[in-house]
Amino acid sequence: MLRVGKKATPYLMVAPYFVMYIAFGLFPILFSLVISFTKWDGITDMVFVGLANYIRIFTNDSLFYESLYNTILIIVITIPVEIILGLLLAVFLKDFFRKSRNALQLINFLPYITTPVAIGIIFQILFDWKNGSVNAVLGMMGIDTVYWLGVPWAARLVVIIMMSWTAYGYKMVLFLSGLSTIPEELYESAKIDGARWWDSFVHITIPMLRPIMLFVVITSIINGFRLFDEPQLLFQSASQPIGGPDHAVLTVVMRYYDVAFHNFEFGYGSAIAYSLFIVISIFSIFSMKIMNRKEESQL
């Protein structure tokens, strides 16, 4: 009996984790997959409709395509900006600000750990039409004020600025961790051979950071498609319709939220969520193949 008890102890220790994961992780995933094939409002009985929800998404839901376009547009612009800012800042902190690197690193990382509610309020104040700081600066420069949260192109620009400002510090930390793994001997040898700082950056730093770059790109794509909190809070507090003016910043997750929790179409909302999962998988696999192909061509 004693031997059986010793053998069972490790399983008993890890059992609470698996119980919690099955109850609050695996079961909701499988349950949402099931109801994506049904018509259900959360109260009445489920009605099995097969693939009707998915057919409706891809053939009869213009807002889904509009939200997908907005999400991809924001991703295509913000990810390069975040990566370039994060990489350059990481390199500058490592090469030119070694004494004050920790303080500057903390300052630039703070936006990433700031709550989305606070970020939404900050940007609402900055880009307010009448009393915003941005319009005040434009007025002092003799430039006409812009209704930032009421014009489609301006609303998209605000969200792009907000997302880039929030996430570039996280990329900076990742690149700093990658830079710490590059041997200093490589830079010293390049310097002895007459290489300039830019030459070392292009031919040593960027190739050696390729694994980190792949991780950053894939996670950025996933997080970009999950965009919801900041634009939702920004335009909700600004008394705007969901997705901002003319649905200019309506993302796929915002579309899912509107369908599931405003219209109470839980079956159709679950179908949107799994359609988003398919889209994320396609973009992630495509990005991995492109970056791996570039790496193979350079070998």
Image (tube, rainbow, N blue to C red):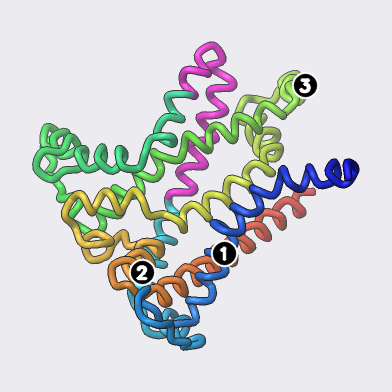
Q: CA distance from mark 2 to mark 1?
A: 19 Å
Q: CA distance from mark 3 to mark 1?
A: 52 Å
Please name the residue that numbered disc 2 is placed on.
260
| Relative height, residue 216 to residue 99 (above, below) | below
Tally the marks: 3
Q: 277 or 158, which is in the foreground?
A: 277
For mark 3, give the secondary structure: helix
Q: 230 or 162, which is in the foreground?
A: 230
Please name the residue that numbered disc 3 is placed on.
185
- The reply to whether the magenta stretch includes residue 91 is yes
Q: 256 or 58, which is in the foreground?
A: 256
Residue 43's label in the rendered image is none
Verify CB contact (< 8 Å) between mark 2 and mark 3: no
The residue depicted at 60 percent of the width and 29 percent of the height is 176
Residue extent of the magenta highlight: 78-105
Q: Amino acid at mark 2?
A: Ala
For mark 2, give the secondary structure: helix
Is 73 positioned to the left or the right of 34 in the image?
left
Residue 27's label in the rendered image is 1
- The reply to whether the magenta stretch includes residue 293 is no
